[in-house]
Image (spheres, grey):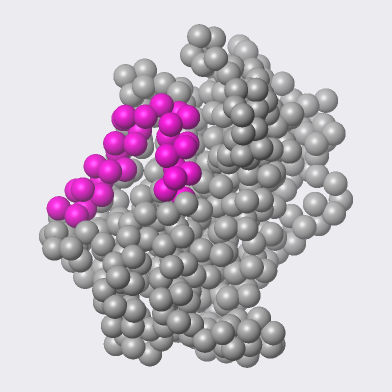
Amino acid sequence: MVMEANPSNPDSRSPAHPDPDEDSTRGVGAAGVIERTRARTHRPKAWAFLALLGPGVIASISGNDSGGMMSYAMTGATFGISFFLPLLFLLAPIGYTMQEMSMRLSAVTHREYRELVLRRFGRFWSGFSVSALAGGNLLYLITEFAGMTTGLTLIGLPLWLADAVSLVFVCLITLLMGYRQKERFSLVISALNIVFIVVAFLTHPDASSIAAAFSTWPRISWNAGGNGMPVFIMATVGNCMAPFMLFFQSSASIDRRMTESDLRSGRADISIGAVLQPVFGAAAMLCGAAVCGKIAHLSSAGPADLVSALIRVTGRWGGALFAIGLFNAGWLSAITISLSTAYTVSGAFGWRRSLRRTVSEEPRFYALYYVSLLIAALIILIPGLPLGMLSVFTQIIVSMLFIPDLAFLVVLTSDRKIMGDHSNPVWKQAMGWGIVVVFAIASVVTIGAGVW
C-alpha cells in the first residue's frame, strides 16, 4: 500500500495542499489542468503540449546553469571538438532516470524526498543530505552570479553594480509573480538558451571534426592535474544531474499538486528537458572549441576572457550573444537552485514552504531564498577568484557529495511499501544502481588521477 500522509504531523502536511480557497485547481493535479486547458481553447494540441512543460524542463535546463555552460565551454576550449560531445548525449539518460524517480516518488507518496530520507535512513543521513545540498548550492550560485555579471560588465557596468543588478533580477521573480506565473516565466527563460546554438553556428564548426567525434573511438589521456581529462570527464558527468535538480523536481512536483494520474505527463515533461539539455550543452562546448588554443593561461581564465576570445572569432555579436546566454542561464538556475535550498532547509526545520503563498505568509521560506542569493552575490566580489575553473571544480565536488542521495533515491523508489505498484521494476533498479556506480567510479578515478 502506498504511504499516506499523517494529518496530525505538521511536517507531513504537504505544501501541495494549502488552504482550500487558494487555487481553483486544487485536487485536480497536472493532468486535470491539461484537461481544462483542452476544454478552454480552440487549439487543444498546442496548449495541451505547453501544459505538459513544467518542473522537468526547468530542472533540466537549470542543470545547464551558467557554471555548467562555462564548464562545457572550458572543456571545448581545452580539448576542442572531441569525444566530450557524444559523451553529453550518452549521459542524457542519467538525468532523465533520476529526475523521473524523484517526480514519481513525490507524486505517489505526496511527500518530499527529504522527508522520506529522514524516515528511512535517519537524522544523520538526512542532515548530511540537506547540508551537502546547501553547501553545493552555494557553490553553484557563485558560478551563476559569475555568469550573470559577465554580460553586464562587458557593456560597461562596474562589477559591484552588475552584481547588484543580477541580484535584484533574481529576487524580483518571487516578489512580483504567483506560482503559475513563475513557472511559465522560467520556461520562457529556458527557451532563450537557443542563443548558444546561434553562437555555435557563428563559429562555423568543422562538420567533419564533429562527425569524427561521434564515429571514432576516443583517445583518452589520464594525465593528472587541473587540466587533465579525468577532471573534465567528472565535471561533464556532474553536469548531467545535479543535486538541486533532484530536490527541486521533488518539491516542485508537490507544489504543482501532482498525483499518480500525472505520472505520464510528468515523464513527458522530463523527457523534453532531457533532450534539450545535451543539445544546449553541446552548443556551448562548440563555442569553447572555437577558441581552443586562443586563450592564454586558460586555467585561470574567467567568463570575460572566454567572451573576449569569442569576439575575435565571431565578431561582437557572437560574444554579446554568448554573454546574454550566460546571464540567462545564470538567471534561471539562480532561481531554481536557491528555491531548492529554501524548500529543503525549510522542510528540515518543519517550516511551511510554498511558492503559492506570499512573503508575509511564509517569511522564513523566502528569507532562506534571499539570503542564499545575497551570500553568493557578496562572494563574487572577492578579487582574484578563478571563476573559469571554479565552474569545473564545482561540478566535481558537488557530484561526489551527491552519490549517497542517488543511492537513497533508488532504494526509496524500489520499495513497494512506499511506492506500491509504482515501485521500480527490476530493469529500472539495475539502471539506477548502474548510475550510482558510474558516479562512484568517476569520483574515484578523478581523485586517483589527482593523487597520482
What residue is drawn where x is 47% and y is 29%? 180
Which one is in front, 293 or 384? Answer: 293
Is 162 on the left-hand or right-hand side of 293? left
Main SS of the magenta segment?
Answer: helix
Query: In this view of the protein, can residue 302 be seen by the observer?
Result: no
Vertical placement of 15 versus 281: above or below?
A: above
Quadrant of the rendered image containing residue 143: bottom left
Vertical placement of 289 versus 409: above or below?
A: below
Quadrant of the rendered image containing residue 90: bottom right
Range of magenta residues: 161-190
Which one is in front, 228 or 51? Answer: 51
Query: In this view of the protein, can residue 205 be seen by the observer?
Result: yes
Vertical placement of 171 versus 77: above or below?
A: above
Q: Position of residue 34 (x, y in %)?
A: 64, 29
- 179 inside magenta stretch: yes
- 378 inside magenta stretch: no
The quarter of the picture where the N terminus appears is: top right
What residue is drawn where x is 30% and y is 38%? 171
Which one is in front, 379 or 255? Answer: 255
What residue is drawn where x is 36% and y is 50%? 331
Vertical placement of 411 versus 73: above or below?
A: above
